Image (cartoon, grey):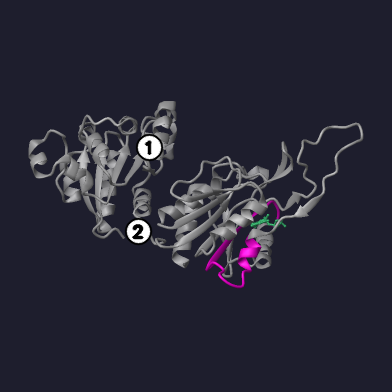
Amino acid sequence: MLTDKRILLIIAGGIAAFKSLDLIRRLRERGAWVTPVLTRAAEEFVTPLSVSSLAGEKVYRDLFDLTDEAEMGHIQLSRSADLIVVAPGTADLMAKMANGLANDMASTLLLATDTPVLVAPAMNVRMWEHPATQRNLATLRADGVSIVGPNEGDMACGEFGPGRMSEPLEIVAAIEGAMKVGPLSGRRVLVTSGPTHEPIDPVRYIANRSSGAQGTAIAEALVAQGADVVFVTGPADAARPHGVQLVEVETAQEMMRAVQGALPVDAAVFSAAVADWRVSSASDSKIKKTKDGLPTLEFAENPDILATVSQMAEGRPDLVVGFAAETDDVIENATAKRLRKGCDWIVANDVSPETGIMGGSENAVTLISDKGAESWPRMSKGEVARQLAERIAKTL
Ligand code: CTP
């Protein structure tokens, strides 16, 4: 709930502004106070009257509105909220924010504020992918601004790709996460992610295939539920999640130590694809080709991190979730794995090449618990993460 939280909602000029009307309604339903600010361009898409009717508060529209300045100056207005939300965040407003411009009401408020800011970007896919926007995005993130979305899909301009503003309920979840008022607030959750690299010599390694995309999505979904997340990742390609305590490791043994260092936690989600073996005969110098034949590698078994934490006699997390990436007899194998490792849930998925799941943006999982196996429809990895985080929140 967001009871009596004050949100300053800046609506910039984009077609997604119509969704901000629903966002206001959702925030009000949750007990928040919404003070709306409309840019001039936003007024082309939504009317001040509809915005103020839904918010139940007056709309701030122009920096040089003298009445407003007498009532509440822009400096004071910028600091009166618990959170400033920019939705939709247009390419133009993000560029102004990244560069510190202050030439209208919205950009001035954003420059003058010392309140946390959350942006829900919305723009054409080419504008989103343009290096200038990506630069501005990186700057905003480095400045501590939280970002939710954008989603991928059909766009009002007829193109397809990332750029659609997140749905109102996704923005509400991000707001709750930013304010740490979600159902998992005060809960500490560990997530492992990505592959591990086990060196053969300084230039070669063995590894499992894993992009880290599902782990990153799970961490972000848990943050959105208000959790304090410790994210232990191997060398993954996926972007690192925002708003987490990040621990980067390379090998399974380092991951094991990082996990032990992160305990105690309320829940732990082991989505990493840990290499089962390391090369015990790893060389400190590069192994050269010789005429004497092929090198012989000796292996040692890596610690099973999931099993170790699941079977802790003392201080075990209340909920331990493992993953099972299988290619055959998915449910049978994963059910047996849950019992063998001693975790509470297993998220099983079929990673046969024809599924396209490995390295793709979608996942089709079966959640296995002591209540049996529950197959979820195929959905985006972000949606799997959101539903899993909600389930964790309900269970803890
Ligand atoms: N896992 C782990 N530490 C390991 C190996 C696996 O924490 N050394 C975790 C993974 O993060 C995942 C789960 O265990 O949550 C399943 O891993 P998987 O490799 O599929 O299981 P294995 O025990 O290796 O079983 P098998 O190789 O027989 O499929």
Q: Measured from the top left, where is residue 343 in percent x and y?
A: 61, 65
Mark 1 residue crowding within 10 angstroms, few (<14) / some (14–19) / many (20+): many
Q: Write the start and end of the magenta stretch as one range.
A: 306-329
Pick whichever of labels 2 and 1 is earlier in the sequence: 1
Q: Pointer 1: what residue?
A: 140
Q: Quadrant of ligand 1?
A: bottom right
Does residue 326 belong to the magenta stretch? yes
Q: Which mark is residue 224?
A: none
Q: Secondary structure at mark 2?
A: loop
Q: Residue at x 47, y 61 (%)?
A: 188
User: In the image, is 358 to the left or to the right of 110?
Assistant: right
Compared to 55, does 37 lie above or below?
Answer: above
- At x 45%, y 46%, the residue is 242
Q: CA distance from mark 2 to mark 1?
A: 23 Å
> Amino acid under label 2?
Val
Kindly identify the residue that appears in the image at 68 percent across and 59 percent down: 304
The single residue placed furthest to the front in the displayed view is: 284
* The N terminus sits in image quarter: bottom left
> Disc 2 marks which residue?
181
Between circles 2 and 1, the one closer to the viewer is: 1
The quarter of the displayed image where residue 335 is located:
bottom right
Where residue 84 appears, as percent x and y from the top left, is: 28, 45
Q: Which residue type carries mark 1?
A: Leu
Q: Residue furthest bottom?
A: 313
Q: Position of residue 123 (x, y in %)?
A: 36, 33
Disc 1, SS: helix
Q: x%, y% of residue 384?
A: 51, 52
